[in-house]
Image (tube, rainbow, N blue to C red):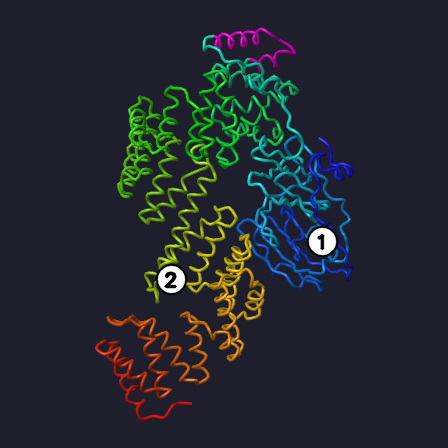
Amino acid sequence: MSSISDAAVAQGVDGLHKLPPVAVMQETLTQKPNDSFILIPCDDQTGLAAFWSGDDFIIVADRIGLSLDGIRKISGPFTDQSIVTLDHATLIRFHLPSHPELSIRRDSRGWQLVAGHASSKSGLMPVVRPGALEFPLAQPGHVVSFPDPATGARLLLMTSKAASGGVTVPFSGPGYRVRASLEGVVVIADADCLIFSLSHAGGVLSSAQSTRLPVGGALVFHANNTAQNQDLIFQGLQNTTPQNLKNRQKEAVDKAGQSSGQEKPSLLFDAVRAALAAGDLPAAQELLSQAQKSGAEAVINSPQNLALSGVVALLSGKIKDAEILADTRWIGMPDMTLWRAFYGLQAGKKSWETLPDLADNISKIKQYPDTLRDLILPSVAAAIIRYGTNGEVKQLGNLPDTPVYALARGLILMREKKGDAARVIFDQMASSSSGGVASVGHVMQIRLRQVLGHAYPDEIVQDYISLQKDEDEAGIAPASSRQILYLGLSSALMQLRQYRSAMMMLSFLLPGPEIPQDILEQAYRELIRKMIFEKLDLIKHTTKLTSAQKNQISDTVALSGQNLPFLTDGPEKAEILMGYGQLLMALDNVSRAQHIFSQAMVLFPAPEQRSQAKELMARAALLQGMTDEAGQLLESMPAQFLSPALAARKTYDLALLAKKKGKADQALALLAHDETDEGLDLRGQLYEASYQWPDAVLVIGRLATRKLPQSGALTDAQQSLAARLTADAVSAHDTDTLQRLKNFLSGRTMGHEADLLLERQFKGAMIRPPSH
């Protein structure tokens, strides 16, 4: 490993990748006002990333709970600021169009942002490693991701718990651009497969598909001939008959047992490899234990033997003990790609992080001895068929025709919608003498009917519950089949709109080979979205909510709010937050809704999407009487990014703002062409407040024409509208409108007292002069 020197930077970060044509002038600190600072109080475990985004300086703290109340503001350039708390981070924005000279300091009280001094730190110089870039942060914090406020590009940030000086010189490579920063590391992730990881030496940027999109230096092959299945762990291993493998295992064990002295630890590891190749996991574990107790640290900690230890633990189902395979030291070593990806699969990492590399290594897996191959390929094949792309499924090729691949063969048929053929396989599995195999078969019988739509959701729910009860009574509940059962049951309950029960099923699930982290998150996202937007649709089609409906909405808000933190920050979550915030508005929890809309605004990448969030934020601010904040939000919505509908909503909000400021003429001018229900209602209020009764009759009359039904009983809201039009017409002495309204309502009652009141108003209007 070597640091990027000035000469290397001049030629390209690693001698291959040129620096991006990004002018550092925007990030250069030029102005020198009098010193002023802002203190962000926090503990010593709070990491920070700080960088310029257009004319805004952004600080990202990897903890929540920071608030403006806890930030000490001193005179200077930091008065124009805002703060948004996400589920796992806090974003602070300072609008500084003059780009003053800034620095960041760390002390016992927290972080200080100082204007008037440039940073005295030399900054981070990334280390180029095979397949990775390592940023030597002394105390790395956490990874945070959200769109760049200025450009909408996806950002990956690594915070730092200690002052590091940030990255002083921006650079780029295939699929990524590293930006200049005052603290932490800020990467523009143009490729979806980039991963930021923590290591003992700092933060490591790599690619989930290292052979397709390499990051950093050239990859390192440790094997002489990977095509012949020679790799870091099993060098020289060749497929042969089971008996030959057993013989080799015995020879290796005997040789290790007869040895003594310095060669014994190495021979024990050789015996572990031989036992593993023969599929004898108990023997491999016992031999590994002996090797690790030998005290020969150099042998035990060699790359080959560390990896071998992880593989034995992994294949034995001891995921925690296999964590060495996730270590960043293996990044950039193609002959370890298979084992890193297989560990990721078993540990439940996101499918896009593991399946591409597993698919690329199918040929290697098939070249392993059958006994070793069959410990790996069945679960790999099942995951690829369930969640992989068509191309990845094609890479599987022909699978061995043995019982351990029955599930994979059934899944392929199910994926291809060949239900009858898949049913035969799952029926055979369900009849197996092995309790585990039979359990999987029973679950897949139900899952097949569910996926192909061959049963109603209530039937599917009953089948899953009956199977669960039977297995619990029999004491047979393999984790693999139970995971699929809970996922399928949750989906069926969701279809029946039994959302709380569906969420309970999801709460029983943990990421694993059957359900990777992103697939589990997808299930949460689908359920939360359905809950929220179903209630939002109810609100949009209901004039006045009943108490029961409000209770239902309140329950949805509580249940979805508890589970929103499971969703990754990004555009999909932002859309859900927009709906969630509108439910809060319907419950009059306007302050909380405004906060939720601010989260959505930060997570949206596109200007129009952000403007949609700002409009709702402005509406919430107006409802709370925060006219200055509402005005600033509306002004920050650029016209070129607004759809006609959004532009109309902005105009309405500006009119509402003008009304609240007592500028009725300005409000009416803004609403002159607004024929929406909201617009007509607000114009009516303005005319009524200024006693312009004829104009009030005109606009409320148009609203009534649209809202009042030709026949049938009137709802409470419709009765109120009719009474309002009547009062306006009475005040305007508009007998024609009163007569038409009386004829329109003829034969329909609004209640005895209301009917009498309206009748008196009708009669009184005939003898009173117009009101002024």
Identify the disc placed on residue 486: none
Q: Are marks 2 and 1 in contact (CB under 8 Å)?
A: no
Q: Residue at x 39, y 58 (%)?
A: 536
Q: Which residues are magenta?
A: 244-270
Q: Is residue 427 left or right of residue 691?
A: left
Q: Residue 80 location in percent, x, y? A: 65, 63
Q: Residue 753 location in percent, x, y? A: 26, 80
Q: Callout 2, which amino acid?
A: Lys
Q: Which residue is mark 2?
A: 540
Q: Nearer the viewer, residue 141 or 1?
A: 1
Q: Callout 1, which amino acid?
A: Gln
Whole-Å distance between the Cαs marked 2 and 1?
A: 46 Å
Q: Quadrant of the C terminus?
A: bottom left
Is residue 281 positioned above or below 181 on the image? Answer: above
Task: Name the image quarter holding residue 716.
Answer: bottom left
Q: Quadrant of the N terminus?
A: top right
Q: Residues within 10 Å of mark 1 (few under 14, many from 20)?
A: some
**In front: label 2 or label 1:** 1
Q: Residues within 10 Å of mark 2 (few under 14, many from 20)?
A: few
Q: Nearer the viewer, residue 115 or 286?
A: 115
Task: Name the image quarter holding residue 30.
Answer: bottom right
Q: Residue 747 location in percent, x, y? A: 21, 77
- Helix, strand or loop at label 2? It is helix
- Helix, strand or loop at label 1? It is helix
Magenta span contains residue 248: yes
Task: Name the image quarter holding residue 752.
Answer: bottom left
Q: Residue 76 location in percent, x, y? A: 72, 63
Q: Is residue 288 left or right of residue 445?
A: right
Is residue 673 positioned above or below 72 on the image? Answer: below
- First in sequence: mark 2 vs mark 1: 1
Q: Which residue is mark 1?
A: 26
Dominant SS of magenta comes to helix
